[in-house]
Amino acid sequence: QVQLVESGGGLVQTGGSLRLSCVASISTLRFNFMGWYRQAAGNERTLVANIHSTGTINYADSVKGRFTISRDYAKNAVYLQMNSLKPEDTAVYYCNAVEMLRSSVTNYWGKGTLVTVSS
């Protein structure tokens, strides 16, 4: 069974930085995409950033220029470096991995890590 374990969340002041980590229980070579989503209280879960196995990266417009996603195959990990944090970045951040086979798409999720940005 695939497990994704996030770490690195916490409380930070506006303008501060945090680095989120997500480690998978299996080789991440299986995953076509790995990325991060977030869900603020009362809102839907939305994409923050993801990275394809080819290296193509997507960012939400709200985090472009501030967040950087990276992937380490040797460590079965994906990271999210978050700089210049704003109160509106406050949310639970979820690690996501997508496995695309010939006839199916499977999403795997971590349990989430809370990021709180104080004003």
Image (spheres, helix red, strand yellow):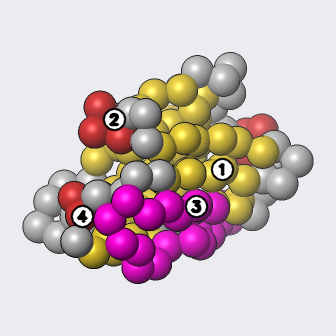
Please name the amino acid that badge 2 sits on.
Ala
User: Where is mark 3, residue-wise?
Assistant: 19
Return the disc, 1 or 3, that comes first in the chain's sequence. Answer: 3
Q: Which residues are magenta?
A: 1-21
Q: Quadrant of the N terminus?
A: bottom right
Residue 92's image quarter? bottom left
**Other-residue count near label 2 (Cα within 10 Å), few / some / many at <14 / 14–19 / ≥20:** few
User: Where is mark 1, residue-wise?
Assistant: 78
Which numbered dot is residue 60?
Answer: 2
Please name the amino acid that badge 1 sits on.
Val
Which numbered dot is residue 87?
Answer: 4
Rounded to the nearest angstrom, the CA distance separating label 2 from label 4 is 16 Å
Outermost residue, left direction?
A: 42
Return the disc, 4 or 3, that comes first in the chain's sequence. Answer: 3
Q: Nearer the viewer, residue 90 or 98?
A: 90
Please name the amino acid that badge 3 sits on.
Arg
Rounded to the nearest angstrom, the CA distance separating label 1 from label 3 is 11 Å
Q: Is residue 54 above or below residue 38?
A: above
Of circles 4 and 1, which is in front? 4
Is 89 a magenta residue? Answer: no
